Amino acid sequence: MKCPRCGADACQIVTETSSHYKGYGAGKGCLGYLCFGPLGLLCGMCGMGEGRTRSKTYWICHNCGNKFQA
């Protein structure tokens, strides 16, 4: 693979991964408290821990440091 900026052949492929996880939902907890009393506060934990992971793949030029999509 050649770098589009400098034309060098010294490029390496890199994968970046990011993740996001949900925590306690205060809105769900308040609504649960109104509907079910003190035990309804546990409703805020519904969906807790579910997450999303994203991966992106890039080429990085060792000559000029340019980062471009694969």
Image (cartoon, rainbow, N blue to C red):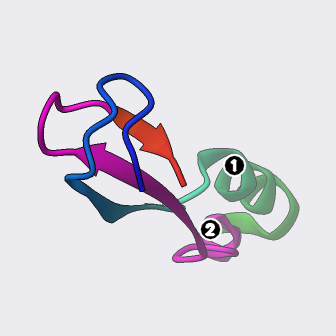
Of residues 35 and 54, the one nearer the viewer is 54
Q: Nearer the viewer, residue 10 or 28?
A: 10
Q: Nearer the viewer, residue 43 or 2?
A: 2
**Left or right of 23 on screen, residue 59:** left
The part of the chain drawn in magenta is 39-66
> Which residue is the extreme one toward the right?
35
Report the residue marked by disc 2. Answer: 38
The number of discs equals 2
Q: Circle 2 sits in a helix, a strand or a loop, which is it?
A: helix
50 lies left or right of 63: right
The quadrant in which residue 63 appears is top left
Q: Residues within 10 Å of mark 1 (few under 14, many from 20)?
A: some
Q: Nearer the viewer, residue 1 or 15?
A: 1
Mark 2 crowd level (few <14, some 14–19, many ≥20, 10 Å Cα): few
Residue 30 coordinates in the image, percent (x, y): 69, 49
Q: Residue furthest top?
A: 5
* Mark number displayed over residue 30: 1
Residue drawn 64% across the image and 64% down it: 44
Q: Quadrant of the image for the C terminus?
A: bottom right
Please state which amino acid type lies under the numbered disc 2: Pro
Give me the disc on residue 9. none
Q: Amino acid at mark 1?
A: Cys
**Tag 1 secondary structure:** helix
Question: Is residue 7 a member of the stretch shown in magenta?
Answer: no
Q: Of the residues under marks 1 and 2, which one precedes in the sequence? A: 1
Residue 49 inside the magenta-drawn segment: yes
